[in-house]
Amino acid sequence: MAGERKIFQVSEITRQIRQVLEGSFGQVWIEGEISNLRRPASGHYYFTLKDATAQIAAVLFRGSQRELRFEPRDGMLVRAQGNISVYERDGRYQILIRQMEEGGKGALQARFEALKETLRLEGLFEESRKRSLPLLPQHVGIVTSPTGAAIRDILNVIGRRFPNLHVVLAPVKVQGPGAAAEIAAAIDLLNARGGLDVMIVGRGGGSLEDLWCFNEEAVARAISRSRLPVISAVGHEIDFTIADFVADVRAATPSAAAELVVGRKEEFEERVAGLRVALSRGLRERVLTLRNRLLAARASPVLREPAEVVRQQMQRVDSLSLRMQHAMTEAVAEGQSRLRDLNLRRVHRLRIAQQRCTQDVRRLDAQIRALSPLAVLERGYSVTTDAQRKVITDVRQLKAGDRLRTRLAAGTIESTVVRTERDAP
Protein backbone atom coordinates (compact mmCIF):
# COMPACT_ATOMS: atom_id res chain seq x y z
CA MET A 1 0.00 0.00 0.00
CA ALA A 2 1.36 3.41 -1.04
CA GLY A 3 2.64 5.53 1.82
CA GLU A 4 2.78 2.62 4.28
CA ARG A 5 5.50 3.15 6.87
CA LYS A 6 8.27 0.59 7.34
CA ILE A 7 8.88 0.14 11.05
CA PHE A 8 12.09 -1.61 12.11
CA GLN A 9 12.80 -3.32 15.38
CA VAL A 10 15.89 -1.94 17.11
CA SER A 11 17.67 -5.26 16.63
CA GLU A 12 16.78 -5.27 12.92
CA ILE A 13 18.17 -1.83 12.17
CA THR A 14 21.25 -2.50 14.30
CA ARG A 15 21.88 -5.73 12.43
CA GLN A 16 21.58 -3.96 9.09
CA ILE A 17 24.02 -1.25 10.23
CA ARG A 18 26.42 -3.97 11.26
CA GLN A 19 26.16 -5.63 7.85
CA VAL A 20 26.77 -2.31 6.09
CA LEU A 21 29.84 -1.51 8.20
CA GLU A 22 31.34 -4.98 7.90
CA GLY A 23 30.70 -5.03 4.14
CA SER A 24 32.02 -1.53 3.53
CA PHE A 25 35.31 -1.64 5.40
CA GLY A 26 36.52 -5.21 5.62
CA GLN A 27 39.94 -5.41 7.28
CA VAL A 28 41.59 -2.07 8.15
CA TRP A 29 44.68 -0.79 9.98
CA ILE A 30 44.13 1.84 12.69
CA GLU A 31 46.70 3.76 14.71
CA GLY A 32 45.74 5.22 18.05
CA GLU A 33 46.50 5.50 21.75
CA ILE A 34 45.23 2.85 24.18
CA SER A 35 43.06 4.10 27.03
CA ASN A 36 40.63 2.59 29.55
CA LEU A 37 42.30 -0.81 29.17
CA ARG A 38 40.48 -3.71 30.85
CA ARG A 39 41.19 -7.44 30.96
CA PRO A 40 38.53 -9.52 32.78
CA ALA A 41 38.90 -13.16 33.84
CA SER A 42 38.11 -14.28 30.28
CA GLY A 43 41.53 -13.03 29.17
CA HIS A 44 40.14 -10.77 26.41
CA TYR A 45 41.37 -7.16 26.15
CA TYR A 46 38.78 -4.36 26.00
CA PHE A 47 39.98 -0.80 25.46
CA THR A 48 39.56 2.43 23.50
CA LEU A 49 41.77 3.59 20.63
CA LYS A 50 41.86 7.37 20.43
CA ASP A 51 43.61 10.29 18.83
CA ALA A 52 43.29 14.02 19.46
CA THR A 53 39.68 14.32 18.26
CA ALA A 54 37.99 10.88 18.19
CA GLN A 55 37.95 7.40 19.63
CA ILE A 56 36.74 3.90 18.79
CA ALA A 57 36.03 0.87 21.00
CA ALA A 58 38.38 -2.06 20.45
CA VAL A 59 38.39 -5.75 21.40
CA LEU A 60 41.35 -8.13 21.26
CA PHE A 61 40.05 -11.61 21.94
CA ARG A 62 42.23 -14.14 23.71
CA GLY A 63 42.56 -16.31 20.61
CA SER A 64 44.11 -13.40 18.67
CA GLN A 65 46.82 -12.73 21.26
CA ARG A 66 49.19 -15.51 20.22
CA GLU A 67 51.22 -13.20 17.97
CA LEU A 68 51.24 -10.30 20.47
CA ARG A 69 54.83 -9.31 21.27
CA PHE A 70 54.18 -6.80 24.06
CA GLU A 71 51.91 -6.14 27.03
CA PRO A 72 49.28 -3.47 26.18
CA ARG A 73 49.13 -0.52 28.59
CA ASP A 74 47.14 2.68 28.90
CA GLY A 75 48.78 5.52 26.98
CA MET A 76 50.59 3.20 24.55
CA LEU A 77 50.44 4.12 20.85
CA VAL A 78 49.65 1.04 18.74
CA ARG A 79 48.74 0.00 15.22
CA ALA A 80 45.90 -2.52 15.05
CA GLN A 81 44.53 -4.54 12.15
CA GLY A 82 41.01 -5.92 12.25
CA ASN A 83 37.38 -5.70 11.14
CA ILE A 84 34.91 -2.92 11.85
CA SER A 85 31.79 -4.37 13.44
CA VAL A 86 28.86 -3.45 15.70
CA TYR A 87 28.24 -4.70 19.22
CA GLU A 88 24.48 -5.06 18.84
CA ARG A 89 23.57 -5.11 22.54
CA ASP A 90 24.97 -1.59 23.12
CA GLY A 91 24.49 -0.31 19.56
CA ARG A 92 28.20 0.56 19.49
CA TYR A 93 30.58 0.18 16.59
CA GLN A 94 34.00 -1.26 17.32
CA ILE A 95 37.05 -2.85 15.80
CA LEU A 96 37.68 -6.56 16.33
CA ILE A 97 41.47 -6.69 16.34
CA ARG A 98 43.27 -9.63 14.67
CA GLN A 99 46.81 -8.39 15.24
CA MET A 100 48.45 -5.44 16.97
CA GLU A 101 51.91 -3.90 17.09
CA GLU A 102 53.51 -1.00 18.91
CA GLY A 103 53.18 2.35 17.16
CA GLY A 104 55.89 4.82 16.30
CA LYS A 105 55.57 6.64 19.64
CA GLY A 106 56.46 3.66 21.79
CA ALA A 107 59.61 5.44 22.93
CA LEU A 108 57.51 8.11 24.65
CA GLN A 109 55.66 5.50 26.65
CA ALA A 110 58.96 3.88 27.63
CA ARG A 111 60.29 7.25 28.83
CA PHE A 112 57.06 7.75 30.79
CA GLU A 113 57.38 4.41 32.57
CA ALA A 114 61.10 4.88 33.29
CA LEU A 115 60.64 8.34 34.86
CA LYS A 116 57.58 7.17 36.77
CA GLU A 117 59.56 4.29 38.32
CA THR A 118 62.50 6.56 39.20
CA LEU A 119 60.30 9.08 40.98
CA ARG A 120 58.32 6.33 42.70
CA LEU A 121 61.52 4.87 44.14
CA GLU A 122 62.49 8.33 45.42
CA GLY A 123 59.18 8.49 47.31
CA LEU A 124 57.65 11.41 45.37
CA PHE A 125 54.35 9.53 45.02
CA GLU A 126 54.01 8.64 48.71
CA GLU A 127 50.70 9.59 50.31
CA SER A 128 52.51 10.61 53.49
CA ARG A 129 54.05 13.65 51.76
CA LYS A 130 50.80 14.87 50.19
CA ARG A 131 49.08 17.85 51.80
CA SER A 132 45.39 18.55 52.34
CA LEU A 133 43.66 21.36 50.48
CA PRO A 134 42.62 24.45 52.47
CA LEU A 135 38.94 24.57 53.38
CA LEU A 136 38.27 28.19 52.39
CA PRO A 137 41.10 29.49 50.20
CA GLN A 138 41.12 33.22 49.43
CA HIS A 139 43.95 33.33 46.89
CA VAL A 140 44.49 30.73 44.14
CA GLY A 141 47.38 30.45 41.70
CA ILE A 142 46.84 28.89 38.26
CA VAL A 143 49.55 27.61 35.91
CA THR A 144 48.11 27.08 32.43
CA SER A 145 47.71 28.62 29.00
CA PRO A 146 45.97 32.02 29.05
CA THR A 147 44.06 31.16 25.86
CA GLY A 148 43.13 27.52 26.35
CA ALA A 149 39.85 25.94 27.36
CA ALA A 150 41.25 25.02 30.79
CA ILE A 151 41.47 28.61 32.10
CA ARG A 152 37.98 29.38 30.81
CA ASP A 153 36.55 26.32 32.56
CA ILE A 154 38.32 27.13 35.82
CA LEU A 155 37.25 30.78 35.85
CA ASN A 156 33.68 29.84 34.94
CA VAL A 157 33.38 27.52 37.96
CA ILE A 158 35.03 30.04 40.30
CA GLY A 159 32.81 32.84 39.02
CA ARG A 160 29.67 30.86 39.72
CA ARG A 161 30.69 29.56 43.11
CA PHE A 162 32.96 32.19 44.65
CA PRO A 163 33.14 35.35 42.53
CA ASN A 164 35.27 37.30 45.02
CA LEU A 165 38.09 34.71 45.07
CA HIS A 166 41.48 36.24 44.19
CA VAL A 167 43.04 34.45 41.18
CA VAL A 168 46.67 34.80 40.06
CA LEU A 169 47.45 33.37 36.59
CA ALA A 170 50.96 32.36 35.58
CA PRO A 171 50.61 32.06 31.76
CA VAL A 172 52.64 29.28 30.13
CA LYS A 173 52.78 27.12 27.05
CA VAL A 174 51.17 23.73 27.74
CA GLN A 175 52.61 21.76 24.82
CA GLY A 176 55.55 21.74 22.50
CA PRO A 177 59.25 22.56 22.96
CA GLY A 178 60.06 24.60 26.06
CA ALA A 179 56.65 24.05 27.66
CA ALA A 180 57.97 21.92 30.54
CA ALA A 181 60.59 24.54 31.47
CA GLU A 182 57.95 27.30 31.47
CA ILE A 183 55.58 25.28 33.66
CA ALA A 184 58.33 24.45 36.18
CA ALA A 185 59.43 28.11 36.33
CA ALA A 186 55.84 29.28 36.82
CA ILE A 187 55.35 26.88 39.75
CA ASP A 188 58.50 28.22 41.41
CA LEU A 189 57.43 31.81 40.67
CA LEU A 190 54.03 31.46 42.36
CA ASN A 191 55.70 29.89 45.41
CA ALA A 192 58.20 32.77 45.59
CA ARG A 193 55.44 35.37 45.15
CA GLY A 194 53.70 34.30 48.36
CA GLY A 195 50.22 35.19 49.52
CA LEU A 196 48.54 32.17 47.84
CA ASP A 197 46.66 29.32 49.47
CA VAL A 198 46.63 26.67 46.73
CA MET A 199 47.76 26.12 43.13
CA ILE A 200 46.18 24.50 40.05
CA VAL A 201 48.50 23.17 37.32
CA GLY A 202 47.02 21.78 34.11
CA ARG A 203 45.49 21.97 30.67
CA GLY A 204 42.71 20.39 28.61
CA GLY A 205 42.79 17.00 26.94
CA GLY A 206 44.95 15.86 24.05
CA SER A 207 47.15 13.09 22.74
CA LEU A 208 50.12 11.62 24.57
CA GLU A 209 52.37 14.01 22.66
CA ASP A 210 50.20 17.02 23.53
CA LEU A 211 50.32 16.23 27.23
CA TRP A 212 53.97 15.24 27.27
CA CYS A 213 55.30 18.38 28.96
CA PHE A 214 53.45 17.27 32.11
CA ASN A 215 55.45 14.03 31.99
CA GLU A 216 58.79 15.85 32.09
CA GLU A 217 61.05 15.53 35.14
CA ALA A 218 61.41 19.32 35.50
CA VAL A 219 57.66 19.70 36.09
CA ALA A 220 57.58 16.76 38.51
CA ARG A 221 60.47 18.20 40.55
CA ALA A 222 58.86 21.64 40.67
CA ILE A 223 55.57 20.21 41.96
CA SER A 224 57.38 18.12 44.59
CA ARG A 225 59.26 21.11 46.00
CA SER A 226 56.24 23.42 46.00
CA ARG A 227 55.32 24.78 49.41
CA LEU A 228 51.76 25.34 48.20
CA PRO A 229 49.35 22.38 47.86
CA VAL A 230 49.19 21.53 44.16
CA ILE A 231 46.17 20.20 42.23
CA SER A 232 47.09 18.51 38.95
CA ALA A 233 44.34 18.93 36.32
CA VAL A 234 45.75 17.59 33.07
CA GLY A 235 43.56 16.37 30.22
CA HIS A 236 40.40 14.33 30.64
CA GLU A 237 39.44 11.76 33.25
CA ILE A 238 41.14 8.93 31.35
CA ASP A 239 44.45 10.79 31.01
CA PHE A 240 47.22 10.24 33.56
CA THR A 241 50.54 12.10 33.68
CA ILE A 242 53.58 12.14 35.95
CA ALA A 243 52.28 15.45 37.35
CA ASP A 244 49.14 13.65 38.56
CA PHE A 245 51.18 11.19 40.61
CA VAL A 246 53.42 13.86 42.22
CA ALA A 247 50.71 16.44 42.97
CA ASP A 248 48.93 16.55 46.30
CA VAL A 249 45.56 16.02 44.58
CA ARG A 250 44.64 14.87 41.07
CA ALA A 251 41.53 16.33 39.45
CA ALA A 252 39.92 14.56 36.51
CA THR A 253 39.52 17.85 34.58
CA PRO A 254 40.33 21.56 35.06
CA SER A 255 36.68 22.18 35.96
CA ALA A 256 36.88 19.48 38.63
CA ALA A 257 40.01 21.17 40.01
CA ALA A 258 38.13 24.44 40.39
CA GLU A 259 35.28 22.62 42.14
CA LEU A 260 37.79 21.12 44.59
CA VAL A 261 39.18 24.57 45.39
CA VAL A 262 35.88 26.41 45.87
CA GLY A 263 32.85 24.63 47.19
CA ARG A 264 29.43 26.05 46.51
CA LYS A 265 28.46 29.03 48.62
CA GLU A 266 25.17 27.33 49.35
CA GLU A 267 27.01 24.29 50.71
CA PHE A 268 28.98 26.43 53.15
CA GLU A 269 25.86 28.28 54.21
CA GLU A 270 24.06 24.98 54.78
CA ARG A 271 27.00 23.69 56.76
CA VAL A 272 27.16 26.83 58.92
CA ALA A 273 23.39 26.62 59.49
CA GLY A 274 23.73 22.98 60.48
CA LEU A 275 26.55 23.81 62.90
CA ARG A 276 24.43 26.63 64.37
CA VAL A 277 21.53 24.24 64.97
CA ALA A 278 23.83 21.59 66.43
CA LEU A 279 25.47 24.16 68.73
CA SER A 280 22.09 25.47 69.93
CA ARG A 281 20.81 21.95 70.54
CA GLY A 282 23.98 21.05 72.39
CA LEU A 283 23.75 24.09 74.64
CA ARG A 284 20.11 23.37 75.47
CA GLU A 285 20.93 19.77 76.31
CA ARG A 286 23.88 20.85 78.47
CA VAL A 287 21.77 23.37 80.38
CA LEU A 288 19.02 20.78 80.90
CA THR A 289 21.56 18.25 82.18
CA LEU A 290 23.06 20.72 84.64
CA ARG A 291 19.56 21.77 85.81
CA ASN A 292 18.60 18.14 86.49
CA ARG A 293 21.83 17.59 88.40
CA LEU A 294 21.11 20.68 90.51
CA LEU A 295 17.58 19.50 91.31
CA ALA A 296 18.90 16.04 92.22
CA ALA A 297 21.53 17.61 94.48
CA ARG A 298 18.91 19.73 96.24
CA ALA A 299 16.81 16.60 96.92
CA SER A 300 19.79 14.64 98.24
CA PRO A 301 19.71 13.74 101.98
CA VAL A 302 23.34 14.75 102.24
CA LEU A 303 22.48 18.36 101.61
CA ARG A 304 19.16 18.32 103.48
CA GLU A 305 20.28 16.63 106.72
CA PRO A 306 24.05 16.03 106.81
CA ALA A 307 23.95 15.02 110.51
CA GLU A 308 21.54 12.19 109.70
CA VAL A 309 23.94 10.90 107.07
CA VAL A 310 26.76 10.86 109.63
CA ARG A 311 24.61 8.96 112.14
CA GLN A 312 23.70 6.36 109.53
CA GLN A 313 27.33 5.86 108.68
CA MET A 314 28.26 5.47 112.37
CA GLN A 315 25.52 2.86 112.78
CA ARG A 316 26.79 1.05 109.73
CA VAL A 317 30.32 1.00 111.20
CA ASP A 318 29.01 -0.46 114.49
CA SER A 319 27.08 -3.12 112.60
CA LEU A 320 30.12 -4.08 110.59
CA SER A 321 32.25 -4.24 113.78
CA LEU A 322 29.78 -6.64 115.49
CA ARG A 323 29.63 -8.82 112.40
CA MET A 324 33.43 -8.93 112.28
CA GLN A 325 33.70 -9.97 115.99
CA HIS A 326 31.09 -12.69 115.51
CA ALA A 327 32.90 -13.98 112.45
CA MET A 328 36.23 -14.06 114.32
CA THR A 329 34.66 -16.02 117.26
CA GLU A 330 33.15 -18.57 114.89
CA ALA A 331 36.44 -18.88 113.03
CA VAL A 332 38.38 -19.58 116.26
CA ALA A 333 35.83 -22.19 117.41
CA GLU A 334 35.88 -23.89 114.06
CA GLY A 335 39.69 -23.96 114.10
CA GLN A 336 39.81 -25.57 117.56
CA SER A 337 37.26 -28.20 116.52
CA ARG A 338 39.25 -29.06 113.40
CA LEU A 339 42.44 -29.30 115.53
CA ARG A 340 40.79 -31.81 117.94
CA ASP A 341 39.60 -33.91 115.02
CA LEU A 342 43.08 -33.93 113.55
CA ASN A 343 44.66 -35.07 116.85
CA LEU A 344 42.14 -37.92 117.26
CA ARG A 345 42.75 -39.12 113.72
CA ARG A 346 46.53 -38.91 114.24
CA VAL A 347 46.38 -41.05 117.44
CA HIS A 348 44.15 -43.60 115.70
CA ARG A 349 46.53 -43.85 112.74
CA LEU A 350 49.53 -44.31 115.09
CA ARG A 351 47.83 -47.21 116.92
CA ILE A 352 46.99 -48.95 113.68
CA ALA A 353 50.58 -48.43 112.46
CA GLN A 354 52.01 -49.93 115.71
CA GLN A 355 49.81 -53.02 115.41
CA ARG A 356 50.86 -53.52 111.80
CA CYS A 357 54.56 -53.14 112.73
CA THR A 358 54.24 -55.73 115.56
CA GLN A 359 52.60 -58.20 113.19
CA ASP A 360 55.25 -57.64 110.55
CA VAL A 361 58.10 -58.19 113.08
CA ARG A 362 56.57 -61.47 114.27
CA ARG A 363 56.07 -62.70 110.72
CA LEU A 364 59.65 -61.80 109.72
CA ASP A 365 61.07 -63.48 112.89
CA ALA A 366 59.24 -66.68 112.06
CA GLN A 367 60.57 -66.59 108.50
CA ILE A 368 64.15 -65.97 109.71
CA ARG A 369 63.95 -68.85 112.21
CA ALA A 370 62.60 -71.17 109.54
CA LEU A 371 65.50 -70.30 107.23
CA SER A 372 68.22 -70.50 109.98
CA PRO A 373 70.73 -73.47 109.80
CA LEU A 374 70.21 -73.98 113.52
CA ALA A 375 66.63 -74.99 112.85
CA VAL A 376 67.91 -77.77 110.59
CA LEU A 377 70.28 -78.98 113.30
CA GLU A 378 67.44 -79.15 115.81
CA ARG A 379 65.79 -81.73 113.58
CA GLY A 380 68.76 -84.12 114.18
CA TYR A 381 71.15 -83.05 111.45
CA SER A 382 74.80 -81.96 111.97
CA VAL A 383 77.51 -80.04 110.09
CA THR A 384 81.12 -81.39 109.86
CA THR A 385 84.09 -79.19 108.87
CA ASP A 386 87.80 -79.84 108.54
CA ALA A 387 90.61 -77.95 110.20
CA GLN A 388 90.18 -75.11 107.70
CA ARG A 389 86.42 -74.95 108.56
CA LYS A 390 85.53 -76.21 105.14
CA VAL A 391 82.23 -78.14 105.14
CA ILE A 392 82.76 -81.87 104.41
CA THR A 393 80.18 -83.25 101.95
CA ASP A 394 82.14 -86.20 100.47
CA VAL A 395 84.48 -88.73 102.19
CA ARG A 396 86.90 -88.31 99.30
CA GLN A 397 87.73 -84.93 100.87
CA LEU A 398 89.27 -86.77 103.87
CA LYS A 399 92.15 -89.12 104.66
CA ALA A 400 93.21 -90.93 107.78
CA GLY A 401 94.47 -88.67 110.52
CA ASP A 402 92.46 -85.55 109.48
CA ARG A 403 90.93 -83.69 112.37
CA LEU A 404 87.22 -82.87 112.13
CA ARG A 405 84.77 -80.63 113.95
CA THR A 406 81.07 -81.60 114.05
CA ARG A 407 78.41 -79.02 115.01
CA LEU A 408 75.22 -80.42 116.62
CA ALA A 409 72.07 -78.61 117.67
CA ALA A 410 73.55 -78.43 121.15
CA GLY A 411 77.32 -78.60 121.31
CA THR A 412 80.38 -79.56 119.18
CA ILE A 413 82.36 -82.85 118.71
CA GLU A 414 86.03 -82.96 117.70
CA SER A 415 87.32 -86.22 116.15
CA THR A 416 90.13 -87.79 114.09
CA VAL A 417 89.60 -89.79 110.91
CA VAL A 418 90.65 -93.39 111.34
CA ARG A 419 89.20 -94.82 108.15
CA THR A 420 86.91 -93.59 105.33
CA GLU A 421 84.32 -95.63 103.55
CA ARG A 422 82.20 -94.54 100.61
CA ASP A 423 78.68 -95.83 100.10
CA ALA A 424 78.28 -98.28 97.25
CA PRO A 425 76.49 -96.75 94.24
Image (tube, helix red, strand yellow):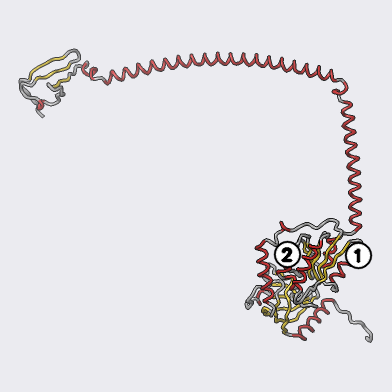
Q: Is residue 233 above or below residue 55?
A: above
Residue 401: quadrant of the picture: top left
Q: Is residue 11 left or right of residue 70?
A: right
Residue 18: quadrant of the picture: bottom right
| Residue 188 - label | none
Could you tell me which residue is drawn at 72 percent across and 58 percent down? 129
Could you tell me which residue is drawn at 84 percent across and 67 percent down? 169
Q: Nearer the viewer, residue 302 or 364?
A: 302
Q: For marks 1 and 2, give the CA distance.
A: 28 Å
Q: Amino acid at mark 1?
A: Gly
Q: Nearer the viewer, residue 381 or 423?
A: 381
Label 2 element class: helix
Give percent across and percent down for residue 52. Answer: 78, 77
Give percent across and percent down for residue 31. Answer: 72, 80
Q: Amino acid at mark 2?
A: Phe
Give percent across and percent down for residue 272. Answer: 90, 51
Label 1 element class: helix
Q: Is residue 101 above or below residue 124?
A: below
Q: Is residue 38 above or below residue 389?
A: below
| Residue 245 - label | 2
Quadrant of the snapshot with the C terminus: top left
Residue hosting label 1: 159
Could you tell me which residue is drawn at 91 percent across and 58 percent down? 265
